[in-house]
Amino acid sequence: MKKFVRYQTGDTVCYGELAGEEIFPLDRNFLDPGCQRAGSAVALSAVRLLAPVAPPNIIAIGVNYRGHSKETNIPAPPAPLIFLKATTAVTAPQTQILLPLSAPDEVDYEAELAVVIGKTAKQVAEDDALEYVFGYTCANDVSARDCQIKIDKQWARAKSFDTFCPLGPAVVQGISPDNLKIQSRVNGQTMQSSTTADLIFGVRKLVSYCSQNMTLLPGTLILTGTPSGVGYARNPQVFLREGDTVEIEIEGIGVLKNTVAAEA
């Protein structure tokens, strides 16, 4: 298993391989073929982690866990349900999720396994799909439910406010995506707890299917969907409020932690 991070020291954005509490700097983006270690290790505590990738596109999949399909009373789709998130929604670990001024009241969390594409993929066969995957990271597909369900009745704006796509802490290679434990916690309380075995469409299918419809560039993210336990499907409903702490944990990857604040 290998873990890769993107981090900042001073004004410089760097890439490195994470080993325990140390980062070994790389001479270029870890997505670039031929990247190598360069220089002495630095302490993880001495740098600021960024989102591990700066994706050219964020492709997200809706209603892709059996449990989530049941809790929302939405039938399982016959094919992957694709929507897009704006790349400006990306934010780093340990940053703030901002409750937007225009829609602060029904902001929800969604724990998701994110697939990081490693090389250009187009018309990829399902059997070959994992050859195009660089690794995996944690994502929080933050969603303004009032925009999504009541106002716009589609998903683009609701999913794309600034800070609505926390990513991290690292991109991990060497794990199987087929049966990973996945959880979300709000203020320490477990809200979602499932495994990727509950996915309706697995990673191989998603990579292949997306590549049939659009070119997947290196660094592209595929957010694979969220399990049951989201806030708007609860009774009573649970939405994020200023001062909350949200954690997304996926087995083998780590914990993505963010706090919640009101947009200034």
Image (cartoon, rainbow, N blue to C red):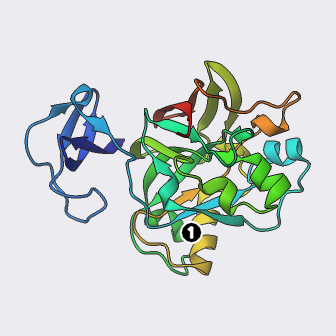
Residue farthest to the front, as pictured: 264
Q: Position of residue 96 (x, y in %)?
A: 49, 35
Point 81% across, 42% down: residue: 67
Residue 23 vertical placement versus 100 (above, below): above
Secondary structure, mark 1, is: helix
Instruction: Specify whether 121 is left or right of 106.
Output: left
- Residue at point 63% right, 31% down? 184
- Where in the figure is residue 68, as x and y percent of width and height? 80, 44
Residue 166 position (above or below residue 22):
below
32 or 232, nearer to the observer: 232
Task: Identify the image quadrant of residue 261.
Answer: top right
The foreground one among 24 and 127 is 24
Left or right: 257 as drawn, with respect to 230? left
Q: Which residue is mark 1?
A: 127
Number of other residues with Cα within 10 Å of mark 1, as a class: few under 14, some 14 to 19, many 20 or more:
few
Residue 217: percent from left, percent from top: 43, 72
The amino acid marked with disc number 1 is Asp
Seen at 50% across and 66% down, the residue is: 57
Residue at position x 68%, y 47% in the image = 143
Name the quarter where the N terminus is drawn. Answer: top left
Which of the pair 174/238 is nearer the observer? 238
- Residue 156 percent coordinates (x, y): 67, 62
